[in-house]
Image (cartoon, rainbow, N blue to C red):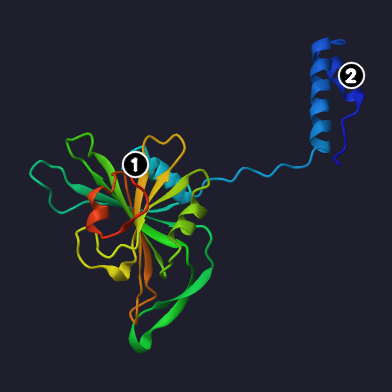
Amino acid sequence: MAAMPRAKNCAAASRRVGGGDSMAVSTCRVLVAVHIASALLPALPARAEAGPLEILLRAFAERWDEMAMQELPGIGWNGISYPADSEQDNAYTYVLRGELRLRGFATVEVPVGVGAAQTTRKVDEGDASFEIRFSNSNDPALRGPHLILMSKPYPSADYAVILRRQMMHGQIVLLADDCTRDALGRPAEQEHAAYYRIDLPDAPTAVFVRAGRMDGGTSGPGETTFAFSLFTPGTDLTNSGCILRQGTP
């Protein structure tokens, strides 16, 4: 137990403010009481802090612009890329790229190079790269960030587990899984895609995500991908030939 302040410290505080000031003594006694209580009570566990992906998705849901996004902590930013051309209405997409570490992964070896010269290097399997796509459309509903594409090395089947590890203050809801096609209706059984909704407390909108994985075969370790959107999947679920798990996204 920590040493407790003695009563004479309160009297000394009183003298410093001028001859037995009752308010100073009372304040000091309150501080002593708080100190004693904190010494007697067991330490409480600290509230889990939001990870970098949760912080990023909240800013995404709040439609932060590209300059504000780059102030987010725990993320390595690689700058903005602009397209060489744009549409006639000047509503083009530009991209902000970055890297972050997903929670819950260990160190793994990934191949570097190809053929006989191929070597390996150690990385954290949770080291993910991403790009945020922005639009400067004249339509306010479309302007700002509208898509985050993220990937991490090695295919992982437990999408929901990965997402829950990142969302200390959010809920993960499975919308559909066992998808056999991509969002455009093309065969994609090897992707093993699933759709989720992420509900963040007090966020202005939910975030929707399509998760998938690909085996790299002989060309690399493969990857797990996440495509985050602010728009309800809607017909994407039907086009993807998924098994629906929720009636309403």
Q: Quadrant of the C terminus?
A: top left
Residue 145: quadrant of the picture = top left
Task: From this view, report whether residue 212 is shown above or below residue 94.
Answer: below
Return the x and y of residue 248 as percentages of the image width and height.
Answer: 33, 44
Which residue matches tag 1?
67
| Residue 196 percent coordinates (x, y) | 38, 52
Note whether 200 is above or below 19 in the view shown.
below
Q: Earlier in the sequence, mark 1 or mark 2?
A: 2
Q: Secondary structure at mark 2?
A: helix
The picture quadrant where one finds residue 99 is bottom left
Q: From this viewpoint, is residue 71 visible?
A: no
Is 23 placed left or right of 84 in the picture?
Answer: right
Q: Amino acid at mark 2?
A: Ala
Residue 100 in the image: state x and y as whole percent. Answer: 44, 56
Measuring 30% from the left and 59% from the top, which residue is drawn there? Answer: 242
**Which structural element holds mark 1?**
helix
Tell me the CA gap for discs 1 and 2: 54 Å
* Category of crowding for the residue at label 2, using alpha-carbon neighbours closer than 10 angstroms: few (below 14), some (14–19), many (at least 20): some
Q: Amino acid at mark 1?
A: Met
Pointers 1 and 2 in contact (C-beta within 8 Å): no
Q: Which residue is mark 2?
A: 11
Q: Residue at x 12, y 48 (%)?
A: 86
Residue placed most toward the observer, 181 or 89:
181
* Quadrant of the rendering where the N terminus is positioned: top right
- Would you say 141 lies left or right of 112 here? left
Q: Is residue 17 left or right of residue 62?
A: right
Q: Is residue 2 visible in this depiction of the protein?
A: yes
Which picture quadrant has residue 28?
Answer: top right
